[in-house]
Image (cartoon, rainbow, N blue to C red):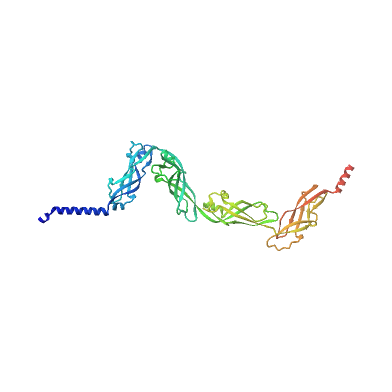
Amino acid sequence: MKKLLNNIGMKLLSVLIAFLIWVVVVNGDNPEKTQAFTVKTTVLNQDSLLEAGSVFDIVEGGETTIYVTARRSVLNSLTSSDFTVTADLESINTYTTVPSVSLVPTCTKKGVTIRQEAMRCVPSSMKISIEDKEEKSFIVSVVTSGRVADGYEVGGLKLTRGDTIVIAGSASTLNKIDKITATASVSGLSSTETVSATLRIYDKNGEEMNLDNLEIKRPDGVLLKEAKTDVRVTIWQIQTGIALDVGLVGEVADGYHITGVTTTPETISLVGSSNALKKLDGRLELADAVDVTGISSTIERSIDLSEYLTNYENLRLEEDAATTVSVKVQVEKIDAITISKPISELVIVGQPENMNMVLTPGDKLPVEIQSEEGSTTILQTSDVIATLDLTEYQSEGTYTVPVQIELPEGYTLVNDVTIVVNLVLKEVATEEATENALEG
């Protein structure tokens, strides 16, 4: 005991020096530092203002920076998500020029304790503006995310409760709103369904707005919690290989005929409801699409399909498909022969007995004939039967009268055949009329 108490002063000094050395070493390896963390402010007790018919906008302090002082080892283990900053609207300071609410930082990470005085918010308070609450209706545009199942497309998007929503907030905030969208996920859909969609509000600069201080309701007043609404997604099927029926208008030039009508592409893909596709029956009619009046050579025309699809309900082109098709109308000169039918072989029906008749041409009647594909008949003039019917031409005068042509099998008539008929009263009939007049 006596030895232990000997030189007690020196021993205490040694202990003190050892402690100081330890403090220096510890502080050298793990010193205290200050680090900044950026955190979004959480607003508490908003209902207290709303119930009073007022709303607020954050002027400053919606996002704050927390400066935290602690050992380096502690700071290294922390991120911004380990902190919260709250502003309690029940403690509004209305005595300042701009109403404000103190910001209170808290470290929420388990096992870590940060003293309140070791955390400092900049800014230290959230400044707000308080206005009377107003309501306004807005049109909602429905957009989609994701892709439907292969072979299908979205045929229609519609809010289940009308196409508008009601937003309650300050006039200044409502006036900033430019558009509202409802994003509906259509991933994997192959049939019509009702899905939940997330509402997003954008200002006139195209920036997404904060919804925290807004009330969003359906037109019937039901509050849309978490800014969600229901959207009816109509799913249509894609049908490929649809042929095009191209309608032609007019007649080609004399001596020519159409040998083919083709389209590029040959077929198209359409999207539609099951009933619309069933009615289509695999063919899209393009009525009166190409005018061929007077053409004597092959032509190509571009046809805008969208003009014709307006005639069909619940039907459209496949997404990203070209809206036009090219139509080629092939025209060739008719491979025809001309038979000179002697007028003497003309069968005349109904010739008036009291008339002299002069025909033009008076010797041979040209008949243009086309041989049908595969025909092997050798055509003679005697095979062509030409009939002139004058039953309806009994008065004196000059007439252009059609001639009826009968052809053997394997041939067709290229052009109508006519002949000029001049009817003049016979002189005998005139003399008899004169004698009767004298006797009378």
Number of numbered tags placed on the structure image: 0
| Any part of residue 16 in sight | yes
Report the quarter where the N terminus lies.
bottom left
| Any part of residue 50 in sight | no
* Residue 269: % across, % down: 54, 55
Q: Find the residue positioned furthest to the left.
A: 2
In the figure, is residue 15 to the left or right of 29?
A: left
In the figure, is residue 281 to the left or right of 102?
A: right
Instruction: Out of 70 and 383, give the one closest to the viewer.
Output: 70
* Residue 226: % across, % down: 39, 46
Relative height, residue 181 to residue 375 (above, below): above
Q: Quadrant of residue 225?
A: top left
In the figure, is residue 49 to the left or right of 361?
A: left
* Residue 198: % across, % down: 42, 47
Report the quarter where the C terminus lies.
top right
Residue at figure coordinates x 76%, y 55% from the top left: 387
Residue at figure coordinates x 32%, y 39% from the top left: 91
Relative height, residue 410 to residue 312 (above, below): below
Instruction: Out of 8 and 343, give the one closest to the viewer.
Output: 8
In the figure, is residue 317 to the left or right of 206?
A: right
* Residue 234: % across, % down: 48, 50
